[in-house]
């Protein structure tokens, strides 16, 4: 004989209940899950001092096998030997060099491109890999181009926003490389400041831009509360001195390409950057 009285349960009435967990709170939990992923990956990209030395080795997709990255494996080994914090690569290069990557070197996957030096419009960037594919390759973050001004602006910014949404769900940091379309404005503080703010508004976690100058770069830094790292660009002014100025004015690191991989001693140049940025 049972001493327990079974209550009748109206399955029809309870099957659709959320038992105290609203749809909104479920979404919050999803966001928190994604946020934890971003925090973990951001801590791989940035060291304990909140700064980073990123080496960009993604030039082959639009410039081909240029000097310094023709032998990408040797360059990667040198960059790792110099103790860079992160490296930017295209999907194929990550896949082909997985045995070199990892450890203390964060991997940032370029997922937009689709134009070369021979393209009549260099701002013709399209999606070349998904966020999901970048994760499967082992990436700690993804890099996306955003153009300011010109015919490529609308499409690139729409794409940036859509990728930001995917990154938020997946918990992957988004690095927006913001570039004025006209070379006349590459270092124009008004254009660069706008680019930083746009990147922030669309959901980027880090923004990569050209350095402007000592008098105006604080304006760039104050445009949004996300980390700003400076691009190297064509060789000209001493890149180490530029990095020093930028860090003093609030930049959180560098993302140098040709200045590193076309240096006489790649590993030594990376060491100098690491010492300068993290001193």
Image (tube, rainbow, N blue to C red):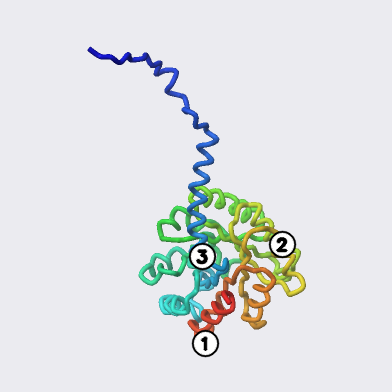
Label 3 crowding class (10 Å Cα cut-off): few <14, some 14-19, many 20+? many
Label 1 and label 3: CA atoms lie apart by 26 Å
Picture layout, residue 159 above or below residue 256: above
> In which quarter of the view is residue 145 placed?
bottom right
Nearest to the eye among marks 1 and 3: give it. Answer: 3
Residue that label 1 marks: 264
Image side of residue 42 versus residue 181, left or right: left
**Looking at the rendered structure, which numbered label has been put on residue 45?**
3
> Which of the image's four quarters has the N terminus?
top left
- The residue sitting at 44% across, 56% down in the picture is 135
Q: Nearer the viewer, residue 8 or 155?
A: 8
- Indicate the position of residue 109 as horizontal and vertical percent values: 49, 62
Q: Name the secondary structure under disc 1.
A: loop
Q: Earlier in the sequence, mark 2 or mark 1?
A: 2
Q: Name the secondary structure under disc 3.
A: helix
Q: Nearer the viewer, residue 207 or 116?
A: 207
Label 2 crowding class (10 Å Cα cut-off): few <14, some 14-19, many 20+? some
């Amino acid at each position: 004989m049972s001493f327990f009285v079974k209550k009748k349960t109206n399955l029809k009435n309870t099957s659709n209940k959320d038992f105290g967990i609203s749809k909104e709170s479920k979404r919050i939990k999803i966001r928190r899950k994604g946020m934890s992923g971003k925090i973990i990956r951001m801590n791989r990209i940035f060291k304990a001092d909140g700064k980073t030395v990123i080496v960009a080795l993604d030039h082959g997709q639009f410039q081909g096998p240029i000097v310094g990255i023709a032998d990408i494996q040797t360059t990667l080994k040198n960059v790792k030997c110099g103790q860079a914090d992160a490296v930017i690569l295209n999907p194929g290069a990550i896949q082909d060099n997985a045995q070199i990557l990892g450890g203390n070197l964060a991997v940032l996957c370029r997922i937009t491109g689709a134009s070369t030096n021979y393209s009549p419009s260099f701002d013709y960037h399209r999606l070349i890999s998904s966020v999901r594919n970048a994760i499967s390759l082992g990436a700690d973050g993804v890099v996306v181009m955003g153009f300011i001004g010109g015919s490529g602006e609308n499409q690139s910014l729409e794409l940036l926003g859509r990728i930001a949404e995917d990154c938020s769900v997946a918990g992957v940091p988004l690095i927006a490389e913001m570039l004025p379309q006209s070379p006349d404005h590459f270092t124009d503080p008004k254009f660069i400041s706008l680019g930083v703010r746009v990147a922030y508004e669309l959901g980027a976690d880090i923004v990569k831009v050209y350095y402007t100058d000592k008098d105006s770069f604080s304006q760039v830094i104050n445009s949004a509360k996300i980390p700003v790292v400076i691009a190297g660009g064509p060789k000209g002014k001493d890149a180490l001195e530029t990095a020093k100025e930028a860090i003093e004015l609030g930049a959180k690191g560098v993302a140098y390409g040709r200045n590193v991989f076309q240096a006489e001693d790649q590993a030594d140049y990376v060491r100098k950057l690491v010492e300068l940025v993290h001193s």
